[in-house]
Image (cartoon, rainbow, N blue to C red):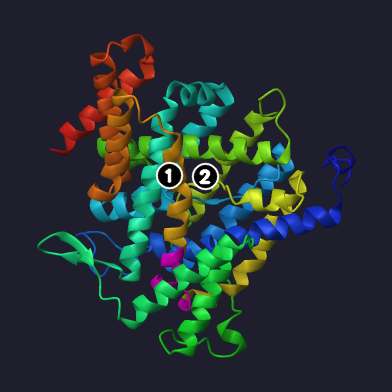
């Protein structure tokens, strides 16, 4: 094992890698409970006509399995200390845009994820994935990340009851004296304190403490005995293989291809940015290039396919892997350990009843804060850049749609650049996307 993972060459050992893997798991364990709540649209009472609710228990199991498979492939094949799991932002797009706003049932949405994963594999093997990533202006990549952050945070504030619906002004400040809202506010405060103190896994620990307070105050039903904490693994039968069954109908749907393109686009940059960030912190970059980049991207693509088959949204590399790297993780064994903990976590499914939307809301808000940090790197001084970037960011929360935000930004980018006399700087791919997204709005109308 030492030879395979090159412990001596990387200056690490079994104990360090194990602790790093555990640290990474604790830093991203929140997804086990946030993802089922998000995909099952917990807190949304009325769904669009013809839309059903995905099985929450099946999503819990699918989340753990997808994370374990993705992390194992990354650890054993690419040999990087990078863990994978269903991505935040991508799950919000799946649930709130595709299912809730567009009225596409979850089974077809899973098929869209599957198609995007298969396309990823083809693009990765052919080497086109990296070329397409490079064709998109960095400012728009940053805007997309920040916009998704604002969108996720907006959902978190809604779930917490801090932001409420208003017939007069669309949104307003909610009733902060509501007990469940106060519980969510406590969760936000404690999570911020833990993270500010530099505690690894602050988001996860914040959820644990919020759940405990909810149980003590009677706002959350306490699990009954040991069986309320540990139980049998929920079946994935309600979601397993459904994506494959829906493939024929999805492949001939113009609306679904827009969804697939959005899955592709968001994961494109999420994965690339994470890989570079984690590898840089671990000192694994060589001449500003990522060794075995093709293998790492393949691991991400394969994990998306596996996740879609078992029943969850796009699986992607997690920036929380930097927590494990900070604890000394340098080899793929870190990711293998993280995968093992995700499989072990399957027996704790009864805790899903304890993790309510008020408990997960702080996680959404904190993740939104972290994602929005990319705003600082956008070149706001250039008006032709600022306009499409701003429209991308602001449109996501205001239209309740990640796809709409991306579409608006990518339509205005070539327009403002051409008017500014910078047409030669626009990559042909951007003109193609301009036409695609313009047709998207025409199709919607």
Determine crowd level at label 1: few under 14, some 14-19, many 20+ residues with C-alpha closer than 10 A: many
Residue 36 x/y as whole percent: 45, 64
Which residue is painted at 33% across and 57% down in the image? 154
Q: Which residues are magenta?
A: 353-362
| Extreme residue toward the left, this view | 168
Residue 278 x/y as whole percent: 64, 41
Name the foreground residue: 423 vs 21.
423
**Image height of 46 relative to 423, above or below:** below
Which residue is painted at 48% across and 26% down in the image? 133
- The numbered mark at residue 372 is none
Which quadrant holds residue 387?
top left
Name the foreground residue: 445 vs 430.
430
- The numbered mark at residue 113 is 1
**Image height of 203 relative to 224, above or below:** above
Residues at marks 2 and 1 touching, judged by CB atoms closer than 8 Å: yes
Q: Which residue is mark 2?
A: 304
| Extreme residue toward the front, this view | 381
302 to the left or right of 408: right
**Image height of 235 relative to 296, above or below:** below
**Image height of 376 relative to 26, above or below:** above
Which quadrant holds residue 418?
top left
Residue 357 within the segment the image draws in magenta: yes
Main SS category, magenta section: helix
Q: Secondary structure at mark 2?
A: helix
As measured in the structure, the alpha-carbon distance from the residue carrying label 2 to the one carrying label 1 is: 7 Å
Residue 60 x/y as whole percent: 51, 64
Q: Is residue 96 visible?
A: yes
Marked residue nearer the N-terminal end (2 or 1)? 1
């Amino acid at each position: 094992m030492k030879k395979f993972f090159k412990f001596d060459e990387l200056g690490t050992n079994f104990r360090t890698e194990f602790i790093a893997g555990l640290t990474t798991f604790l830093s991203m364990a929140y997804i086990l409970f946030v993802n089922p709540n998000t995909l099952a649209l917990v807190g949304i009472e009325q769904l669009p006509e013809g839309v059903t609710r995905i099985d929450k228990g099946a999503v819990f199991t699918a989340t753990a399995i997808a994370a374990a498979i993705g992390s194992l492939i990354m650890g054993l094949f690419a040999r990087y200390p990078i863990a994978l799991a269903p991505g935040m932002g991508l799950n919000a797009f799946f649930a709130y845009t595709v299912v809730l706003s567009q009225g596409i049932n979850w089974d077809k949405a899973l098929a869209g994820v599957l198609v995007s994963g298969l396309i990823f594999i083809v693009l990765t093997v052919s080497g086109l994935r990296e070329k397409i990533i490079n064709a998109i202006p960095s400012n728009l990549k940053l805007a997309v990340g920040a916009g998704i952050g604002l969108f996720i945070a907006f959902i978190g504030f809604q779930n917490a009851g801090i932001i409420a619906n208003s017939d007069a002004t669309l949104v307003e400040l909610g009733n902060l004296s509501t007990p469940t809202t106060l519980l969510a506010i406590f969760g936000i405060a404690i999570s911020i304190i833990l993270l500010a103190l530099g505690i690894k896994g602050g988001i996860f620990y914040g959820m644990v403490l919020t759940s405990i307070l909810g149980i003590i105050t009677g706002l959350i039903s306490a699990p009954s005995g040991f069986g309320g904490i540990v139980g049998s693994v929920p079946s994935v039968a309600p979601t397993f293989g459904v994506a494959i069954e829906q493939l024929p109908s999805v492949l001939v749907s113009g609306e679904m291809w827009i969804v697939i393109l959005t899955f592709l686009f968001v994961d494109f940059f999420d994965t690339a940015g994470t890989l570079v960030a984690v590898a840089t912190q671990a000192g694994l970059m060589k001449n500003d290039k990522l060794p075995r980049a093709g293998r790492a991207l393949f691991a991400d693509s394969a994990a998306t396919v596996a996740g879609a088959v078992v029943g969850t949204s796009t699986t992607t590399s997690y920036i929380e892997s930097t927590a494990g790297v900070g604890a000394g993780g340098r080899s793929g064994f870190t990711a293998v350990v993280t995968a093992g903990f995700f499989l072990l976590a399957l027996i704790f499914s009864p805790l899903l009843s304890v993790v309510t939307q008020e408990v997960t809301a702080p996680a959404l808000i904190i993740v939104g804060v972290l994602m929005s940090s990319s705003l600082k790197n956008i070149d706001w001084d250039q008006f032709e850049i600022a306009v499409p970037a701003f429209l991308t960011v602001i449109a996501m929360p205001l239209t309740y749609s990640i796809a709409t935000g991306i579409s608006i930004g990518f339509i205005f980018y070539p327009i403002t650049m051409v008017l500014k006399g910078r047409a030669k700087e626009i990559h042909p791919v951007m003109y193609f996307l301009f036409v695609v997204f313009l047709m998207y709005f025409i199709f919607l109308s």
